[in-house]
Amino acid sequence: MKSETFQDKVCVITGAASGIGRALAVELAGLGAKLALSDVNMDGLDETRAMLGQTEVNLSHLDVSDAAAIAAYPAHVLAELGPADFVFNVAGLTRVGEFKNTPLASMETILDVNYWGVVRMTKGFLDQLIETKGTVVNISSLFGLIGYKGQTHYCASKFAVRGFTETLALEMADYGVGVCSVHPGGVATNIARNAEVDYMPNTGKTREEMDAEFDTLAITTADKAARTILEGAARRKLRIIVGADAKIASFIQRVFPQSYTKILNLYTKDKVLN
């Protein structure tokens, strides 16, 4: 990856207080980017800032489910740093549970953050990206490629992100704007441990057991995920697959579109992934 791709570029990152968002900020700081970082967790965002040295950084408390706040945010970034060259939509939530036992309000919350947050941010910054011939990078998931038991909320939101992003790429081609859909597998972040869990009577698992399972499946570090994402964004790859597990599962889904769920259940032993 050539450092000049990001040198002095204005890079906007949501969900920058931890995980992949923080790792992207650290990598981009090392590449000389100017950073607009946001999150609902200001303590975590301050910790991220402390890791970035003398990089030009703007920090903002931003809830991506707040439409009014997002509508105002692009003008703030423009005034502080200039027009955006890259927008990384990382902020997300997950929730584990069977759809039958899930209140619709829970589904709406996940979609409001994971899907509508991406759509709102993309819409808000689109004029700037057209001006700079920039790139928007939307974090979907392995679960934006495959269905998985206990992840109805998350899969619905991440499939939506993929559909939105891949279609947007077709529309933006004539404007010179890059559009990337990112599909990480198990990445060692806090998203699973912060997840709310609805009643799942058929698992018989405690929350502690579910967290332990995730730890064994989170085989990719956030730092490695960030480097993979940036390499793909620099090349404007439409689909960026992160992690060997995601690559394997994606391949199985394409080869066995009717039976991949049974095959993957054998591979994961019916574990609850994220």
Image (cartoon, rainbow, N blue to C red):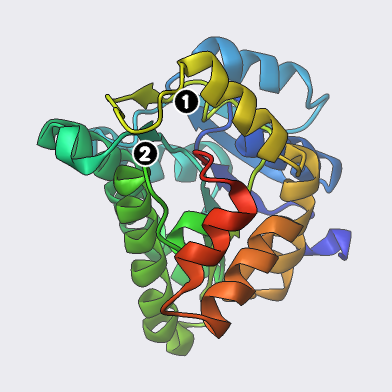
Residue 204: image quadrant is top left
Residue drawn 42% across the image and 53% down it = 148
Using the image as rendered, state which of residue 149 and residue 182 is in the foreground: 149
Q: Quick check: can you spot residue 112? A: yes
Image location (x, y in percent) of residue 160: 32, 61
Task: Say which quadrant the N terminus sits in.
Answer: bottom right
Front position in the image: 45 or 220 = 220
Picture residue at 34% right of the left edge, 36% below the top: 64
To which quarter of the image does residue 110 belong?
Answer: top left
The 10 Å Cα crowd at callout 1, few under 14, some 14 to 19, many 20 or more, is some
Residue ID at (75%, 59%): 244
Quick one: label 2 or label 1, which is nearer the N terminus? Answer: 1
Q: Which mark is residue 52?
A: none
Circles 2 and 1, Cβ within 8 Å, touching? The answer is: yes
Q: In the shown orientation, is residue 28 left or right of residue 37?
A: right
Circle 2 residues within 10 Å: few <14, some 14–19, many ≥20: some
| Secondary element at tag 2 | helix
Between 193 and 138, the residue placed more toward the observer is 193
- Residue sitting at 21 percent across and 42 percent down? 99
Residue kind at label 2, given as amino acid type: Tyr
Outermost residue toward the bottom? 174
Kindly identify which residue carries mark 2: 73
The x and y percentages for residue 108 are 18, 39
- Reading the image, the residue beneath label 1 is 60
